[in-house]
């Protein structure tokens, strides 16, 4: 249901039919976070800062799931391009083994080191944020293995041309989250008043439902491809391929996410108002970027299948077309974020200081977005081709080699505006690096 046959359809048709469910899915995910922000904003700037402070750390662990799922997309889409049904099934089963084991280990380690991690990010200048941040972080981490299951299932389906499944899972989680958020945050009716932690519990309830549906789906004959019990038996050759491709991607994204956590130290220097504006700005920019995520997701699937089928010219044409549409659409949306900066910020927190900071954020960042987000097109083309070492290098350079050193200098010389300017400079540089990787690498060499 909703599957696109990439090898038979027109390229433009495939791009948009693969992209739109991912755009909606990722937009729902961002709205999911915005809903949390909206209700937590009613508690005050300090409580609102809790998920903003912890999100880079949580995403560091989530990046492990995304990294291994990227490996799954490369292996499974190229197997599909070769018409290797057995390879698709076996690789899918091994992907679950790897990601679930990783998710459980990440949860265990993340919770054990919760206090030193959060205290290290927040520092001594804003101690009032720490207890809220820890309570949110620990509860959210409990649901991490569920995210690994959901993400792996969505990636398997997407690699086979069914990008609507992930959209449906995100929709279910979003609805459940919106329902339980106010009930658990404010203690409405028979529900306990959990405050900041209530937002994380609401998320976990949605994750549990989506994970159950995901597992049921891949074992069902209604799926694009049914995974049998024997497909889950350890196949060390396939596991080694997933690890070989997944570890660079997972490490690259995790190290990058750790970089965002490090940047948060500089943002936190300027107090709750700047933290809140930064959090609002990132959420809205992420929402705008969902178009890019959708197009890039389509590119990874299509490039993977075209490489598997040795149709390299079609793979290049896919990347060019996706780049054009990304710059055009994001350009229009960036004008809107620039023009309505104050109104967007005020929607979340009606605080004059936060609104002023949010206005500055959007005025600085908006017009770097069309080129910056286009880096995802080339990055995902490399992912589909299985060149995850290159994406790892790009991810690490993006933060640790470029953005962090620039922000470290500018934040101490220009104040909070230096953080925003550093973001712009690093955004533009990373695009050209990723483009060069795609242009001059041997991405046409298949991994399966």
Image (spheres, grey):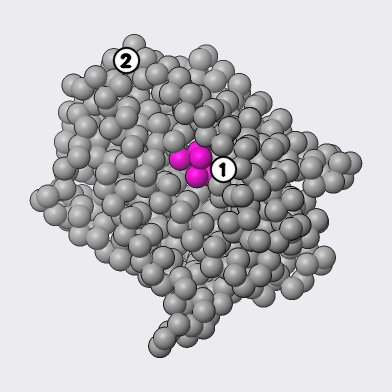
| Quadrant of residue 49 within the rendered picture | bottom right
Residue at 14% in and 54% down: 220
Q: Is residue 211 magenta?
A: no
The spot of residue 324 in percent (x, y) is 45, 19
Please give the label number shown on residue 306.
Answer: none
- Quarter in which the N terminus is drawn: top left
Residue at 61% in and 21% down: 432
The spot of residue 86 in percent (x, y) is 17, 38
Dominant secondary-structure state across the stretch colored magenta: helix
The furthest residue to the right: 413
Determine whether label 1 and label 2 are within 8 Å by CB.
Answer: no
The furthest residue to the top: 313
Residue 79 lies, with reference to residue 98, above or below; the image says above
Residue where numbered disc 1 is placed: 285
Residue at 47% in and 51% down: 30
Q: Is residue 448 visible?
A: no
Residue where numbered disc 2 is placed: 314
Q: Earlier in the sequence, mark 1 or mark 2?
A: 1
Q: Is residue 342 visible?
A: yes
Eye-nearest disc, 1 or 2: 1
In this orientation, which residue lies closer to the viewer: 154 or 246?
A: 154
**SS for dot 2:** helix
Give, as a single range, the part of the protein colored magenta: 285-290
The CA distance from mark 1 to mark 2 is 31 Å
Residue 425 lies, with reference to residue 100, above or below; the image says above
Residue 215 lies, with reference to residue 306, above or below; the image says below
Q: Is residue 286 magenta?
A: yes
- Mark count: 2
**SS for dot 1:** helix
């Amino acid at each position: 249901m909703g599957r696109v046959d990439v090898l038979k359809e027109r390229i433009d048709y495939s791009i948009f039919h693969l992209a739109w469910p991912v755009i909606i899915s990722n937009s729902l995910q961002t709205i999911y976070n915005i809903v949390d922000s909206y209700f937590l904003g009613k508690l005050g700037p300090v409580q609102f800062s809790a998920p903003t402070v912890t999100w880079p750390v949580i995403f560091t662990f989530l990046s492990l799931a995304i990294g291994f799922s990227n490996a799954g997309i490369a292996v499974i889409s190229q197997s599909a391009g070769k018409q290797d049904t057995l390879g698709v099934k076996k690789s899918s089963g091994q992907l679950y083994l790897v990601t679930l084991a990783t998710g459980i280990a990440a949860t265990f380690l993340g919770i054990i080191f919760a206090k030193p991690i959060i205290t290290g990010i927040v520092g001594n200048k804003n101690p009032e944020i720490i207890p809220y941040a820890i309570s949110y972080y620990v509860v959210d981490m409990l649901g991490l293995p569920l995210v690994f299951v959901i993400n792996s299932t969505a990636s398997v389906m997407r690699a086979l041309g069914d990008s609507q499944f992930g959209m449906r899972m995100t929709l279910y989680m979003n609805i459940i989250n919106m329902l339980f958020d106010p009930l658990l945050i404010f203690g409405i009716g028979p529900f306990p008043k959990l405050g900041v932690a209530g937002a994380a519990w609401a998320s976990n309830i949605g994750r549990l439902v989506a994970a159950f549906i995901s597992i049921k789906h891949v074992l069902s004959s209604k799926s694009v491809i049914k995974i049998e019990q024997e497909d889950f038996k350890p196949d060390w050759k396939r596991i080694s391929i997933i690890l070989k491709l997944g570890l660079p991607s997972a490490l690259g994204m995790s190290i990058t996410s750790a970089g965002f956590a490090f940047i948060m130290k500089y943002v936190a220097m300027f107090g709750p108002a700047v933290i809140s504006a930064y959090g609002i700005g990132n959420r809205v920019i992420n929402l705008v970027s969902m178009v890019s995520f959708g197009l890039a997701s389509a590119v990874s699937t299509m490039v993977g299948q075209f490489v598997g089928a040795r149709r390299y010219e079609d793979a290049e044409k896919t990347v060019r077309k996706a780049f054009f549409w990304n710059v055009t659409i994001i350009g229009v949306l960036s004008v809107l974020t620039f023009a309505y900066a104050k109104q967007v910020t005020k929607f979340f927190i009606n605080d004059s200081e936060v609104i002023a900071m949010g206005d500055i954020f959007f005025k600085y960042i908006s017009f770097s977005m069309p080129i910056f987000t286009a880096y995802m097109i080339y990055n995902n083309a490399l992912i589909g081709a299985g060149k995850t070492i290159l994406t790892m290098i790009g991810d690490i350079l993006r933060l640790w080699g470029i953005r962090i050193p620039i922000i470290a200098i500018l934040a101490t010389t220009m104040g909070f505006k230096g953080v925003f300017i550093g973001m712009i400079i690093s955004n533009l540089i990373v695009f050209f690096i990723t483009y060069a990787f795609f242009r001059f690498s041997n991405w046409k060499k298949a991994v399966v």
